[in-house]
Amino acid sequence: MPEPAAPRPAPADRARVFFALWPDTRTAAALHEIGSGLHADCGGRLMREASLHLTLAFLGEVPRARVDELLALAGRLRAAPFGLALTRSGSWKGNRVVWLAPDDTPPALEALVASLSQALRAAGFGLEERPFSAHLTLVRNARQAPQPLTRELGWQVGDFVLVESGRRAEGAQYRILGRWPLRGGAAGEATDGDDGRAGPGTGDAVA
């Protein structure tokens, strides 16, 4: 599932949003270090450490009036935490987008994506039809394909987020709108009366 194109500014009454896994500070630093090594070989634009993420479901522009609906929907999902081993590098779009990915997608991640996508479609939100392909973009506008990955990275995933994507001159701007812990149980299982909503993240990040 290739990354969506760079966003254009959304109208004031609409928000460009997506659900994602957002790494903790230590994992983001390790990812950025790997990305820096790949960038030294393939050139292009290295993604900023604070903006690294793995997209779960990309919605595009939605009415701002429906953002609260997305927050409530995500809070009703129940999914197990999991470990994610990023073991290989690769590229798309004529080698211009360089990414890390697992050899095998964890069943808990597949279940989270499936239940999230099902809930979004049931609520009338449009999603891309392409199959989910777990990956994390590290470099854009690369000049050549990356070298094979020589260092694997393990990521203990404990939550997921809803993110708004905007546009600045220096790149895409990301703002975390909501964050939900993965608290165990079957993915997609509703909580008992608690919408599970956590507060937003620590601020804006620019890609």
Image (cartoon, grey):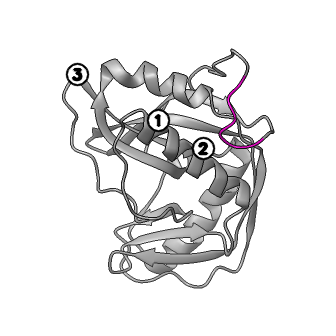
Q: Position of residue 55 (x, y in %)?
A: 50, 51
- The amino acid type, in three-letter code, at marker 2 is Trp
Q: Which residue is drawn at 50% across and 46% down?
A: 117
- Residues in magenta? 186-191
Q: What mark, if any, has residue 163 been given in the picture?
A: 1
- The amino acid type, in three-letter code, at marker 1 is Val
Q: Quadrant of residue 30?
A: bottom right
The answer to whether the residues at label 1 and label 3 have Cβ atoms under 8 Å apart is no
- Queried whether the magenta region covers residue 190, the answer comes back as yes
171 is higher (above) or lower (below) than 67: below
The answer to whether the residues at label 1 and label 2 have Cβ atoms under 8 Å apart is yes
State the residue lying farthest toward the left.
11
First of labels 2, 3 by sequence position: 3
What residue is disc 2 on?
A: 22
For label 3, the crowd category at 10 Å Cα-Cα, with few meaning under 14, some 14 to 19 and many 20 or more, is few
Q: Residue at x 63, y 57 (%)?
A: 110
The answer to whether the residues at label 2 and label 3 have Cβ atoms under 8 Å apart is no
For label 1, the crowd category at 10 Å Cα-Cα, with few meaning under 14, some 14 to 19 and many 20 or more, is many
Q: What mark, if any, has residue 13 been given in the picture?
A: 3
Residue mark closest to the camera, 2 vs 3? 3
9 is higher (above) or lower (below) than 13: below
Q: What mark, if any, has residue 138 been given in the picture?
A: none
First of labels 1, 3 by sequence position: 3
Does residue 136 appear in this view? yes
Q: Distance between the residues labelled 2 and 3?
A: 26 Å
- 121 vs 51, left or right, is left
Element assignment for label 1: strand
- The amino acid type, in three-letter code, at marker 3 is Asp
